Image: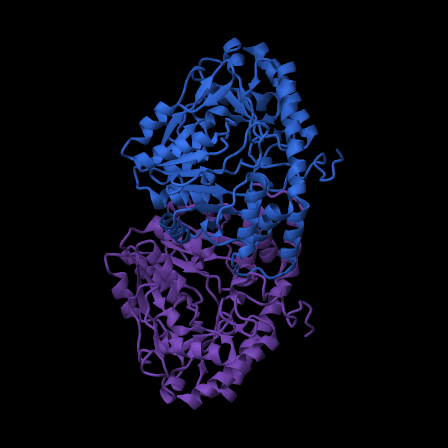
Chain colours: A blue, B purple
Amino acid sequence: MADVFGFDNPVKRRHHNWAKWDVADDELPMTIADMDLPTSPQIVQALHDKVASATYGYEDIPQEYYEAVQGWLTRHHRFTPPLEWMSFATGVIPALSSLIRTLTTVGDNVLMLTPVYNIFFNSAANNGRHPLASPLDYENASHTYSINWADVEKKMALARTTMMVVCNPHNPSGLVPEPEDLAHIVRLARQYGVIVVSDEVHGDMLWDDTLDYTPILSLPEPLRGNVIELISPSKTFNCAATHACMVLIADPNLRAHAVRGFNNDEIAEPNLTAVPASIAAYRDSDEWYAAMLSYVRANIELVNDTLAREMPLITPVKMAATYLPWLDCTDLFAAHPSSPVSSVSPDYQSTEVEALDRPHTVSDEFTAFIRQTSGLLVNPGGEYFGNGATFIRMAVACPRHQVEDALARLKRSYDLWCEQH
Amino acid sequence: MADVFGFDNPVKRRHHNWAKWDVADDELPMTIADMDLPTSPQIVQALHDKVASATYGYEDIPQEYYEAVQGWLTRHHRFTPPLEWMSFATGVIPALSSLIRTLTTVGDNVLMLTPVYNIFFNSAANNGRHPLASPLDYENASHTYSINWADVEKKMALARTTMMVVCNPHNPSGLVPEPEDLAHIVRLARQYGVIVVSDEVHGDMLWDDTLDYTPILSLPEPLRGNVIELISPSKTFNCAATHACMVLIADPNLRAHAVRGFNNDEIAEPNLTAVPASIAAYRDSDEWYAAMLSYVRANIELVNDTLAREMPLITPVKMAATYLPWLDCTDLFAAHPSSPVSSVSPDYQSTEVEALDRPHTVSDEFTAFIRQTSGLLVNPGGEYFGNGATFIRMAVACPRHQVEDALARLKRSYDLWCEQH
């Protein structure tokens, strides 16, 4: 397929204040979940048009924004939410943090399935709530995760558990909850008086054709009253800095309460890029989206093939979703243990931890070793709690040659680690 | 002077989701404080360049942003704050709301001088704090405001008063506090354990050559420890939707506390326009700035001259700052009273009020009458509490012909009001 969107060409991000690229000149960052690919030409054009207006005053949110979101969900996810379910917020994490403040009380438990995107922990802990982990079960033989229902129910039933944050599909495990999984979560939540907030920013990127992402509000009544769905073009269209999130809430009372919180927290007003970028993404960028999916899927296959061939002691978890391969290094650390001084044992599994006070794990030691020996930056799995201590995470939505470079660097570090441990 | 920046040409804002222009086709909005003038070409170019990067991921805040702010304050306000005093927030009101949450306690009084920008009241009330007004003194003969120091001290001394929000220069009164005024406020605040937050977004627009705006942190030690200064290019450069505010705090402990709050409240990360627009504004746009000042000054003079000639019962307060003429209609309402049914008496002066629960005033009746009879929208002074009940406010940073249109509409409504009342 011709590279009509320029995915093979590197986007200049070094020395341009991108957080991901704040690294030394010879280092290669594969960490933060944004793309090193150009976004859709329609988004770029929409922002050029907006900038050309030369006047950047206070904005309204037009009806066509809500319609664009509705159209996207209808075309790609067979889900047509009423427009009145939607409210704007300046981002998924600002919305989540505000919802935690508005809908729970200081000291409450906020339940989440680990390993999970670590900022969920911060949102809870920063606001004086207790991030409560329900670790996913992990089958070592098949390298697959599943929900531990007994543990979820036990923790949902705690009096202080008032919110559960779901990551659907799940980052970093790549788990795609089935509709029945989501329904079971919502039923338990109803039973125990828990509000479910579902972060669905990875819902547009699935790699297993036998699986569908299920928008949580597409569940039938009565499974909607205690549910909040967060979507954003940020991951799919590489536009996190447009600061746009759509919050979908079916229940009018819950919605009014949540939106009041967004207003008080001053996260309800769009900057000048949020509206045009979101409309161009959701309404006009299907062609770019299809090409991006195909391109990133090939990157993930390249990672899988290269690891199997050259680094057999690192096994990618079966990636059903996200562009963030989650790499199981348990066999590597078993065959080549880290130094005993600076790491915890590979069978360490965190269950209830503070966001910013996690133990140093072998994954931290390994990623530091990789950076030191090859200049490659990947995320230590310990960041994500659960059984992450023996995993690493690598973002691969980037030009193919960058993935090849990253894999070559990883191979160099892998060989050195095996030699030295 | 040649119109090199196109100020005479209307910027197309009707039907483009600008909040100010969400009006009927035959209506003319002169309300919200954003400009209908094109912003500086350097800002437009900087945003075009940023948009052209086609990748909109997570950003860092570069050193050159802080240096641009420092350079602006040095060149235009003889004040060179250390870079380490500065922190980024997504806007002045998000920062103010966060500071109120972080640095005061539910039930505390937040003191402010009225009439004042009404959103200050919302920031306090939305967060369970009590907006406490100290009305400015007003001399009817000279149409000038001054601070009632006895009242300020009485209210500062209340045990529950823990923050004072200053508007420097003052919106809507146009009052420019002298350095000694600011010093006196800060001394009283130190004496009574009050934190002073100064919103200085109007500091770049002064019309009285005998007066200077004083950045509050340019006061000498020991008048800095309990002070927070908020600046933004939003008003000066017509870029409110770039969502950028610089928070200056000299005291390191206070700064650490405040910044922790910005992080918890998720207002510490820049969208993709905040950094390039702010740098281009503060570093590269002095020529545009000088031309804009000259243009808007002429608009204000046109308002003053036209009122004196054609509408003698409306008297503009001497506008030392802001592009928001504050028009005293006391004589008009004395000569032509409103209907007694729907208004309060012209000598109504609010002192302690809830943000969203203010009485209907004659200014509301008059502005509704203006809208109905000529399609002109201006703000009723009652919105701003204090003695605003007999005032109206009109934003005039727009093409000259738009000011002329607005004045012609106002004249039509004025004549009709005089006929019918």
Q: Residue at x 39, y 62 (%)?
A: B166
Foreground residue, A166 or B117?
A: A166
Residue A355 showing in the rendered view: no
Direction from residue B165 to residue A319 in the image, left or right: right
The location of residue B28, given as percent across then percent down, is: 54, 73
Direction from residue B352 to residue B405 in the image, left or right: right
Q: Is residue A385 above or below residue B116?
A: above
Q: How many marks?
A: 0
Q: Is residue B309 above or below residue B212?
A: below
Q: Is residue A236 above or below residue B375?
A: above
Residue B302 showing in the rendered view: yes
The location of residue B3, given as percent across then percent down, is: 68, 71
The location of residue B136, given as percent across then percent down, is: 34, 72
Direction from residue B186 to residue B373 in the image, left or right: right
Q: Residue at x 38, y 83 (%)?
A: B330
The location of residue B333, given as percent across then percent down, is: 38, 84
Foreground residue, B71 or B123?
A: B123
* Quarter of the image that includes the N terminus of chain B: bottom right
Extreme residue in the left direction: B159
Extreme residue in the right direction: A2
Q: Quadrant of residue A100?
A: top left
* Quarter of the image that includes the C terminus of chain B: bottom left
Foreground residue, B376 or B86?
A: B376
Foreground residue, B73 or B99?
A: B99
